[in-house]
Image (tube, grey):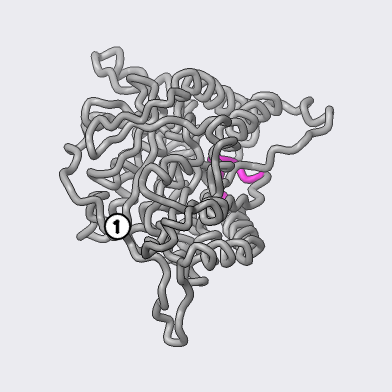
């Protein structure tokens, strides 16, 4: 392995990767599509039974729930006069961050605008890259710091520690340990380096989810029972690693007897989960590529059909969840690959997020005003009101995940 790695220089890999771009895109899209299709067969159960207070089973949002959903403004209008006599309780404001790999840069752009506006959230849920950005937000990281790390390419380069083309080329060599009796979980990348990179950037005093100043949950799929779960306590790094363990690319993560993979296959936009965490009002950030009509000739390209079906599957999963949000911010991430490591894609993603958030700022301000949620900053930069965090998730912690994979 060392000899092979030395022989193949990085620039050579990049040059050769162009020849594999089409087949790799097809393979990746088909792998994700198959996983999405299989997971959805199990995920529509209405059950949301708590297994423990650390790992809570949830379910995907469906269209029936979306049809019955009433926005917060409608709830205010329909309140009885009797309830109006009582002192109203300030609604909790939640943030739901969707999955989308490198498109997560757009979520940072959204946060830059909302944080500059002085808007604070009472709870946050995130799926896949949304769990990474959401976790760092809850830890108190600034949008500028997150942008710097993303634009430098640190996040995606640690997500895939060596080029995907090279990893596939040496895949037969990686089968040797299996022949010698080692049986790791399926996947091209372990993800441990990604978790350790995230941990290095964390506050040393805040390593567990329950220690965060803002309640947070990472959404992941348990491969054993085919159900989505919210990881609400325990090691934050492992929760992020589990929620972003993309099928076929990254090995699943074992936590408390469950085997977790990317939550995006069932709850890619965790709005319902944000409400289960206690939010009365939810602002969601959907970073899927826009699902628009394509010309006939578009589907003559290699990999276009499998990618189209993957885009449709994400659209189908996310549409009812988006309808459960009070406001959904949807940046234009067209053309940004899920696994892009290009700096210009990260820069474009951040800009798209900023533009989409600014466009909806008047609507967001009106909603918060009607809900009685103050926000904004004073001249010296201190917060005037905003949403106060409702406290940390006090309680026990999940055991440390198994490190073997």
Q: Residue at x 47, y 47 (%)?
A: 156
Occupied quadrant, residue 2: top left
Which image quarter: residue 161? top left
Q: Is residue 366 above or below residue 250?
A: below
Residue 81 in the image: state x and y as whole percent.
47, 57
Q: Which residues are magenta?
A: 335-342
Q: What residue is shown with label 1?
A: 202
**Residue drawn where x is 29% and y is 52% of the image:** 199
The quarter of the image holding the C terminus is: top left
Q: In this rendering, does residue 186 appear at all?
A: yes
| Neighbour tally class for label 1: few under 14, some 14-19, many 20 plus, Cα within 10 Å | some
Where's residue 315, x and y in %?
62, 34
Instruction: Tell me which residue sits at (48%, 53%) in the image.
Output: 80
Is 337 in the magenta?
yes
Between residue 272 and residue 295, name the one nearer to us.
272
Q: Which x, y percent locates residue 130?
A: 45, 47
Q: Can residue 16 be spotted in the picture?
A: no
Q: Position of residue 179 (x, y in %)?
A: 30, 12
When the figure is inspected, residue 257 is found, relative to residue 379, above or below; the finding is above
Q: Is residue 312 magenta?
A: no
Q: Which residue is drawn at the image coordinates 30% and 16% (left, top)?
A: 178
Viewed as shown, does residue 196 lie left or right of 13? Answer: left
């Amino acid at each position: 392995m060392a000899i092979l790695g030395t022989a193949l220089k990085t620039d050579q890999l990049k040059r050769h990767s162009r020849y594999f771009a089409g087949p790799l895109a097809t393979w990746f899209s088909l792998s994700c599509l198959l996983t999405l299709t299989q997971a959805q067969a199990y995920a529509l159960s209405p059950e949301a039974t708590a297994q423990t207070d650390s790992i809570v089973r949830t379910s995907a949002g469906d269209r029936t729930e979306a049809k019955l959903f009433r926005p917060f403004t409608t709830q205010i209008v329909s309140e009885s006069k009797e309830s109006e006599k009582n002192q109203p309780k300030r609604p909790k404001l939640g943030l739901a961050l969707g999955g989308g790999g490198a498109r997560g840069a757009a979520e940072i752009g959204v946060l830059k605008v909302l944080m500059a506006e002085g808007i604070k959230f009472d709870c946050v849920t995130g799926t896949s890259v949304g769990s990474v950005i959401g976790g760092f937000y809850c830890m108190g990281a600034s949008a500028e710091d997150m942008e710097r790390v993303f634009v430098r390419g640190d996040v995606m380069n640690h997500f895939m520690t060596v080029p995907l083309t090279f990893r596939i080329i040496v895949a037969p060599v990686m089968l040797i340990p299996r022949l010698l009796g080692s049986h790791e979980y399926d996947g091209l990348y372990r993800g441990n380096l990604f978790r350790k990179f995230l941990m290095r950037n964390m506050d040393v005093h805040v390593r567990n989810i329950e220690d965060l100043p803002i309640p947070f949950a990472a959404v992941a799929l348990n491969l054993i029972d085919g159900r989505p779960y919210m990881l609400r306590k325990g090691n934050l790094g492992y929760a992020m690693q589990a929620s972003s363990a993309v099928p076929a690319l990254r090995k699943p993560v074992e936590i408390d007897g469950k085997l977790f993979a990317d939550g995006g296959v069932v709850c890619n936009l965790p709005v319902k989960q944000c409400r289960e965490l206690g939010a009365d009002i939810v602002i969601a950030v959907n970073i899927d590529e826009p699902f628009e009509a394509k010309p006939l000739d578009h589907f003559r390209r290699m990999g276009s059909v499998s990618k189209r079906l993957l885009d449709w599957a994400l659209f189908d999963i996310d549409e009812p969840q988006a309808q459960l949000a009070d406001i959904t911010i949807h940046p234009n991430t067209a053309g940004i690959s899920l696994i892009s490591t290009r700096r210009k894609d990260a820069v474009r993603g951040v800009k798209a997020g900023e533009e989409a958030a600014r466009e909806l700022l008047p609507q967001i301000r009106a909603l918060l005003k009607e809900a009685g949620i103050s926000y904004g900053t004073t001249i010296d930069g201190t917060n005037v009101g905003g949403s106060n965090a409702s406290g940390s998730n006090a309680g026990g912690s999940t055991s440390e995940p198994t490190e073997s994979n």
